[in-house]
Image (tube, rainbow, N blue to C red):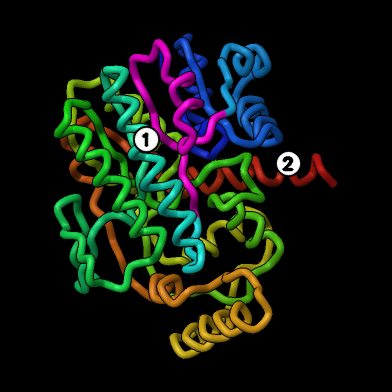
Amino acid sequence: MILVTGGTGLVGSHLLYKLSESGAKLRATYRKAYKLDRVKQVFSYFSSDADRLFNQIEWIEADINDIPELEKAFSGLTHVYHCAAFVSFEPDKYKQLRKINIEGTANIVNQCLRHKIKKLCYVSSIAAIGHHNDSEKLITEETAWNPEEDNSVYAITKYGAELEVWRGTQEGVDAVVVNPGIILGGGHWDSGSSGSLFKKIYKGMSYYVPGVTGYVDVWDVVNAMTTLMESPVKNEGYILVSENLSFKDFQTKVAQRLHVKPPQKEAKPWLLKLAWRLDWLNHKLFGKRRSLSKQSAKSALSVTKYSNQKLQNDLNFTFKPIDQSIREVSDLFLKDFKKNT
């Protein structure tokens, strides 16, 4: 029996489709019942038999910080994919991020130890990988994390979650960690995943930012995870990035595929610095949710390029070209948009 936590998320839903299609015996956790429809939607993209595949999964409503619920979810398991996480870059959400990402992951690791799980796969992020100031030097799995750097609250908690996984490996759990870049996939247009980027670009974005980061297709993430879990590889971490693209190039490619006007104006550093300060002021004075933190503004200006060589070397893995991923996800978005209008 395989458990997938966070089964209603972007990675979780695609992972469940792949595993259910293979006939694996599956259990998945969810927290809000309405999100199960997103899983069904994802399944319907790829199969005319989506309902049958969905119904093969044993769904359990469980919070990863509720130990009795986790005990029930872990009964009879052999392998665990831990995809559940809270994604936010709002500084005031730090306690919630710690509770879910660090404490929740510690609970998963402890249950793996208690139930003698054969192997754990944890979905982290490139946010938890170290950085350096040389824009031409690729970031690798060996790039050191600097706790003194002005890291985002999300990055801090994802790094802390990884420490819990590595702690588990010292206590007897075999594990692999994947660090995806921005994940491109369909069916989650309104959530905090990259799907919302397609929706924003479709609605129109005037500005682009000059930074560079790594992108990866959701199926590359899923295929890397399942391949690693089925391989003898253990206690290793892998960056999952197909290509490094500027935000401008990404927005332009998506806009062209969606047949809308791409952004034309560059958001200069002074404008971003002003924007995050005004955002902070709005939060303090009027209680508005943060939409741009100091760390997010810095990231938007940073040129960070990632190496995927380790995964290619260890698994002979081939990544999908990002142009193909953008084409496929854009087409799914347009199909869903036309269906709902």
Residue at the location (22% across, 41% down)?
237
Q: Residue furthest front?
A: 68
Tell me the amino acid under the disc marked 1.
Answer: Asn
Kindly report the distance in space between the C-alpha atoms of the residues bearing marks 1 and 2. Answer: 37 Å
Q: Position of residue 1 (x, y in %)?
A: 41, 12
45 w.r.t. 268: above or below: above
Q: Quadrant of residue 298?
A: bottom left
Q: Which residue is mark 2?
A: 336
- Is residue 130 within the magenta segment? no
Which mark is drawn over residue 107?
A: 1
Q: Closer to the observer: label 1 or label 2?
A: 1
Q: Position of residue 269 (x, y in %)?
A: 44, 86
Q: Which residues are magenta?
A: 62-87
Q: Position of residue 282 (x, y in %)?
A: 63, 81
Residue at the location (22% across, 58% down)?
139
Front in this rendered view, residue 127 or 160: 160
Front in this rendered view, residue 181 or 148: 148
